[in-house]
Image (cartoon, rainbow, N blue to C red):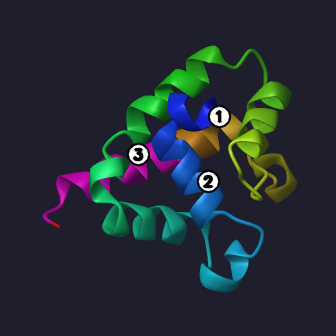
Amino acid sequence: MLEQQYPALWQFLGAYLHQDWREEYESTSDAVQDFVTGSRVLAVNLPPEIDDVLASATDDVSLEELLVDLGSFFIPSRAGLDPRDWLRQMKDEAQLLLTQPG
């Protein structure tokens, strides 16, 4: 169900921030850049899906549980980050990359 509800987030979190993501990327910003570059058609949906997730999550714990349910092995709080701020950063970076010719 989550895959259908949030296909871009599902793909980004599950395929780019997978269990071994640190072997491929130095940061989550590198992963979002690779996602936008490699899956531009799907990546267009990432910013609005992030908005939906932020609006629906009642607290940070449920937000991080949702990220895990969507396939993420990156847990913002374990990296000392606020999960909402981190998602907003991913959204902003995706939007910026999507405005560039590609």
Q: Helix, strand or loop at disc 1?
A: helix
SS state under label 3? helix
Q: Position of residue 47 (x, y in %)?
A: 40, 37
Q: Which part of the image, by quadrant, shows the C terminus?
A: bottom left
> In the drawing, what numbered circle is on residue 84?
1
User: What distance separates the C-alpha of mark 3 from that of mark 2?
Assistant: 16 Å
> From which residue to which does the magenta span run?
89-101
The residue carrying mark 3 is 92
Q: Nearer the viewer, mark 2 or mark 1?
A: 2
Look at 62% across and 39% down and name the residue there.
Answer: 85
Q: Residue at x 40, y 53 (%)?
A: 93
The first of marks 2 and 1 along the sequence is 2
Q: Amino acid at mark 3?
A: Asp
Q: Residue at x 18, y 60 (%)?
A: 100
Q: Position of residue 74 (x, y in %)?
A: 75, 57
Would you say residue 46 sits in the magenta stretch?
no
Find residue 13 and name its label. 2
- What residue is rendered at 45% in x and 43% in y? 91
Q: Looking at the rendering, in which quadrant would you find the N terminus?
A: top right
Give the CA separation, mark 2 to mark 1: 15 Å
Work out whether residue 12 can be spotted: yes
Question: Which is more toward the observer, 70 or 61?
Answer: 70
Q: Secondary structure at mark 2?
A: helix
Callout 1, which amino acid?
A: Arg
**On screen, 16 above or below 53?**
below
Magenta portion: prevailing SS class: helix
Residue 15 rendering spot, x and y as whole percentages: 59, 63
